[in-house]
């Protein structure tokens, strides 16, 4: 027994050296201190007007914030930038998923920067209705354009907005223009829902299509076709060139079925390949011709005025909705009213009327 005590087992664990702390308390304190430092609206505006991309990004984050405390600060930045805005061409690009919007925008954007343009791409990614998350992968898709010093790519989540327009896209356009970007491209989700939102904030509306997907006739939807200023058949390369040319003829024929536009512009149809860059320069020439015509007949400026009025009314609607749901008494009544509607104790219309009356009395 005493012999065992003198010779312990080889499996006996000896005390080792404690590993060093992975996280440095000094580093944590430094990061927390840095995060607390928020630039003032004046500093953000100065940075934006100087062409500082970091200031622009931070201002856009502020504008997109749903925190009510950030609203006044965001409005101050936007109002200060407004006199320096409205000097760009705004282009909306839409199309069904898989049409190659991101690849097209990268090729188109690179062409514009080669002409000396400063391009801002506001790419709106679809948000999940289940997890409410969004991939925001447009910077990954546009790996060449993202490295271009004359380009700025800002992906945003669409949230609950139909048609793929982020809630604050309109204000973001103002900030990008004030930062010196003369060409603003808005890429939408492209699910065919409420594309009017895109049309109401751009000068030129481009609809991307592909051939051989059954959309030469089935995909000719009157609403979106009427809004389009140009239709471009993408992926016109390799064995697909003949099909793309056939689709071009069919879409061109379909355009003649719609009434003339107020702008006096006759929509065009063309083909292109975002991979080979064939036909990309022709798209910009079409847009340039559109701008020349609409500025000569004053439609360009009248449309901008109408858009400003539209977004004022939209902002009022949005703010009223926000105020309604954030009202303390409405929040208390909402759950019980929902249950009453679910149990058929109260009709949805009567319930809505009840809540609205409560809100407006307060």
Image: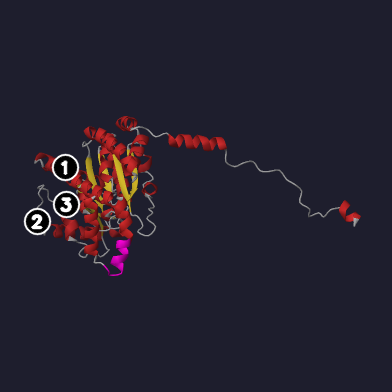
Q: Position of residue 22 (x, y in %)?
A: 59, 42
Q: Note whether 99 is above or below 84 in the view shown.
A: below
Q: Earlier in the sequence, mark 2 or mark 3?
A: 2
Residue 145, visible in the rendered structure: yes
Mark 1, other Cα within 10 Å: few <14 / some 14–19 / many ≥20: some
User: For residue 44, which quarter of the picture?
Assistant: top left
- Residue 274 shows up from this direction: no
Residue 81 appears in which quarter of the rendering? Answer: top left
CB under 8 Å between discs 2 and 3? no
Is residue 337 shown in magenta? yes
**Outermost residue toward the front in this view:** 361
Name the residue rendered at 9%, 53% in the picture.
Answer: 260
Indicate the colouring scheme. secondary structure
- Nearest to viewer (mark 2 / mark 1): 1
Residue occupied by mark 2: 259
Label count reads: 3
Closest to the observer: 183 or 301?
Answer: 301
Residue at image mark 1: 304
Residue 293 lies, in percent from the top left, at 12, 42
Residue 337 place in picture, x, y as percent: 29, 62
**Which label sits on residue 268?**
3
Contact (CB < 8 A) between labels 3 and 1? Answer: no
The structure residue drawn at horizontal position 31% and vertical position 48%, both measured from the top left corner, is 123
x then y, percent, for residue 269: 18, 53
| Quadrant where the N terminus is found in the figure | bottom right
Q: CA distance from mark 3 to mark 1?
A: 22 Å
Numbered range of the magenta stretch:
336-345
Q: Residues within 10 Å of mark 3 (few under 14, many from 20)?
A: some
Q: Which mark is residue 171?
A: none
- How far apart, in angstroms, are the residues tagged by discs 2 and 3? 14 Å
Under circle 2, the secondary element is loop
């Amino acid at each position: 027994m005493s012999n065992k005590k003198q010779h312990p087992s080889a499996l006996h664990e000896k005390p080792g050296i404690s590993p060093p702390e992975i996280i440095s308390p000094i580093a944590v304190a430094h990061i927390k201190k840095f995060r607390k430092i928020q630039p003032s609206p004046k500093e953000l505006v100065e940075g934006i007007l100087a062409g500082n991309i970091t200031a622009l990004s931070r201002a856009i984050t502020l504008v997109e914030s749903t925190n009510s405390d950030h609203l006044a600060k965001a409005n101050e930045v936007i109002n200060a930038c407004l006199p320096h805005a409205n000097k760009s061409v705004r282009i909306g690009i839409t199309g069904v998923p898989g049409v190659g919007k991101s690849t097209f925008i990268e090729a188109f954007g690179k062409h514009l920067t080669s002409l000396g343009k400063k391009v801002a791409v506001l790419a709106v990614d679809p948000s999940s209705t289940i997890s409410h998350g969004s991939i925001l992968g447009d910077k990954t898709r546009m790996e060449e354009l993202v490295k271009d010093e004359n380009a700025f790519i800002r992906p945003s989540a669409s949230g609950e907005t139909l048609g793929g327009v982020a809630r604050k896209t309109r204000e973001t356009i103002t900030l990008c223009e004030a930062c010196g970007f003369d060409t603003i491209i808005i890429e939408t989700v492209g699910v065919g829902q409420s594309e009017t939102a895109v049309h109401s904030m751009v000068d030129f509306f481009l609809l991307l299509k592909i051939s051989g997907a059954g959309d030469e006739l089935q995909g000719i939807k009157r609403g979106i076709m009427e809004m389009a200023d140009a239709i471009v058949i993408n992926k016109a390369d390799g064995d697909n060139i003949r099909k793309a040319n056939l689709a071009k003829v069919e879409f061109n024929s379909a355009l003649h079925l719609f009434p003339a536009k107020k702008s006096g512009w006759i929509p065009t149809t063309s083909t292109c390949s975002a991979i080979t860059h064939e036909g990309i320069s022709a798209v910009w020439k079409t847009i340039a011709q559109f701008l020349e015509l609409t500025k000569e007949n004053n439609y360009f400026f009248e449309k901008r005025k109408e858009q400003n009025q539209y977004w004022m009314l939209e902002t009022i609607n949005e703010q009223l909705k926000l105020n309604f749901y954030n009202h303390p008494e409405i929040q208390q009544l909402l759950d019980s009213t929902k249950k009453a509607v679910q149990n058929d104790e109260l009709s949805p219309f009567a319930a809505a009327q009840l809540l609205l009356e409560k809100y407006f009395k307060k």
